[in-house]
Image (tube, helix red, strand yellow):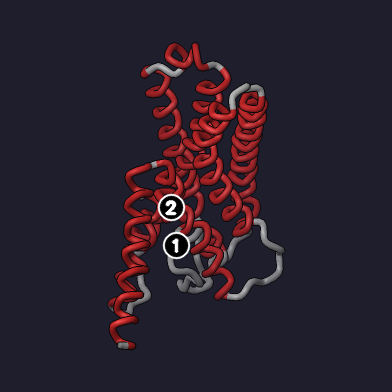
């Protein structure tokens, strides 16, 4: 909700009022909030993998390991580190002199598009933060992979098929969200270094900034029996109502 609310409402307002402007302070705020929410999502997805590892591999110790104090500490560490990371990124980006116009080829204030407007050597300024970002992202990714390797090994040792199904149903929604999130980020920022077209940049930005937050509630809700029953009733109701109208018109 946080990441999608940072970019989409402003873009919708500009579209409805046929405007293409955003204030300098608004742009800085948008960059800061977007970095906070996207980074926090990655950290929280990593913590959720650890939570599932404890629940499946060490179920008898889950209550003592994942107690309320541990959860609070992890939440504080997540939001504190993301806040500091976003402050550094935002301050570094907006401290650069912008001398190549003020038009961003994007529907929201994206850091790579802002850096294109700078007239200084941005690579040296961004090198430190890029190294830190890559190290943090790689560390979280390795932790995710190792957690799920241990989880799948433990699940495959469960003798009953029902137990395996229950364990997999607990992990698959989270794994699907992780896959959607990481694949879109990688596709957007690790594309070939040729000069991309405006339409491609816009499509990639929508893929990693809008699609994952919009899909997450649907993925996590697949295990909700009441929701699935409601979707089935709605689908069948639409099918039979359409069929009935079609039959009446033919008659």
173, 7: nearer the viewer = 173
116 is higher (above) or lower (below) than 250: above
> What's the CA distance linking mark 1 and mark 2?
18 Å
Residue 193 lies, with reference to residue 145, above or below; the image says below
Return the residue nearer the eye: 39 or 103: 39
Q: Residue at x 48, y 70 (%)?
A: 104
Q: Where residue 109 is drawn, which disc sits there?
A: 1
Q: Position of residue 73 (x, y in %)?
A: 41, 22
Provide residue 226's location: percent of width, then percent of height: 32, 44
Structural crowding at the residue carrying mark 1, measured as other residues with C-alpha within 10 Å and reported as few (<14), some (14–19) or many (≥20):
many
SS class, disc 2: helix
Q: Residue at point 50% right, 42% down? A: 173
Query: Which residue does the image show at 45% across and 37% down from the upper left?
Result: 84
- Residue tagged 2: 213
Label 2: how many residues lie within 10 Å, few (<14), some (14-19) or many (20+)?
many
Q: Earlier in the sequence, mark 1 or mark 2?
A: 1
Where in the figure is residue 136, as x and y percent of width and height?
A: 60, 37
At a point 49% along the width and 43% down the height, the residue shown is 39
């Amino acid at each position: 909700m946080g990441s999608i609310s940072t970019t989409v409402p402003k873009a919708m307002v500009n579209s409805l009022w046929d405007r293409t402007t955003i204030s300098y302070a608004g742009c800085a705020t948008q960059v800061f909030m977007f970095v906070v929410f996207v980074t926090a999502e990655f950290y929280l997805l990593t913590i959720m993998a650890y939570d599932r590892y404890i629940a499946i591999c060490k179920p008898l110790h889950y209550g003592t390991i994942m107690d309320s104090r541990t959860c609070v500490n992890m939440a504080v560490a997540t939001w504190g580190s993301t806040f500091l990371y976003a402050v550094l990124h935002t301050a570094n980006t907006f401290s650069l002199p912008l001398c190549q116009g003020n038009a961003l080829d994007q529907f929201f204030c994206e850091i790579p598009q802002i850096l294109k407007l700078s007239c200084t050597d941005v690579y040296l300024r961004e090198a430190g933060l890029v190294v830190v970002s890559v190290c943090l992202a790689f560390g979280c990714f390795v932790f995710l992979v190792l957690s799920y390797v241990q989880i799948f090994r433990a699940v495959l040792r469960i003798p009953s098929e029902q137990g395996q199904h229950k364990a997999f149903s607990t992990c698959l929604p989270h794994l699907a969200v992780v896959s959607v999130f990481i694949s879109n980020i990688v596709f957007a920022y690790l594309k070939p270094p040729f000069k991309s077209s405006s339409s491609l940049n816009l499509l990639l930005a929508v893929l990693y900034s809008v699609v994952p937050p919009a899909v997450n509630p649907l993925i996590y809700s697949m295990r909700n029996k009441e929701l699935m029953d409601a979707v089935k009733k709605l689908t069948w109701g639409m099918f039979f109502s359409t069929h009935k109208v079609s039959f009446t018109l033919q008659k």
